[in-house]
Image (cartoon, rainbow, N blue to C red):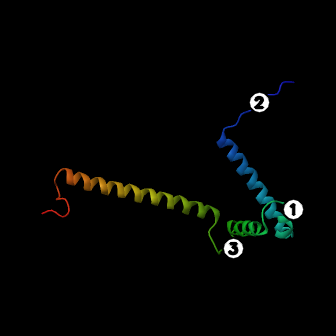
Amino acid sequence: MVTKSVTLAPSDIRRSLAAIRSVRRERIIDLVRAGRSPGSLAREFEPSAQWIRNWVRQGDRDASRRADGLRTAERTELARLRRKNATLREERDILRRAAAWFARETNSIPISGTR
């Protein structure tokens, strides 16, 4: 029997680890909902009791059991929009500086302080 070595790209490894963490998180949340305390699960598994409570709270928001915060999809969308907004502001500032520079170079406006 010949075994074949498989080499994964770093992005594939990151995706696989994220999937494993997600499944583990869901299992811990299910154990809390089944009656186990976050403290006992924290002693048994790695994350702290507060992390586990946060996961349960966020899971409740995602399942529409709570309305005191953003769902995961909304949080992701908000982060994406904030990044895009920052990029657009940066591009606007670059264009503003370029327009001012070209206006000075073509003598369309006087350099500030001279008249």
Position of the N terminus, as image quadrant, is top right
Position of the C terminus, as image quadrant, is bottom left
Q: Total number of numbered labels?
A: 3
4 horizontally vs 102: left or right:
right
- Please give the label number shown on residue 44: 1
Most extreme residue toward the front is 113
Residue that badge 2 annotates:
5
Q: Say what secondary structure mark 2 lies in.
A: loop
Residue that badge 3 annotates:
66
Question: In the image, what residue type sits under mark 3?
Answer: Arg
How crowded pointer 3 is (Cα within 10 Å; few <14, some 14-19, many 20+) is rated as some
Residue drawn 71% across and 34% down? 7
Most extreme residue toward the bottom is 68
Q: Nearer the viewer, residue 72 or 44?
A: 44
**Residue 59 appears at what percent x and percent y?**
72, 66
Residue drawn 36% across and 57% down? 92
Q: Say what secondary structure mark 3 lies in.
A: loop
Q: Nearer the viewer, mark 2 or mark 3?
A: 2
Most extreme residue toward the top is 1
**Residue 75 appears at what percent x and percent y?**
60, 64
Q: Nearer the viewer, residue 112 or 64?
A: 112
**Residue 50 appears at what percent x and percent y?**
75, 69
How crowded pointer 1 is (Cα within 10 Å; few <14, some 14-19, many 20+) is rated as few
Q: Nearer the viewer, residue 105 or 66?
A: 105
Question: In the image, what residue type sits under mark 1?
Answer: Glu
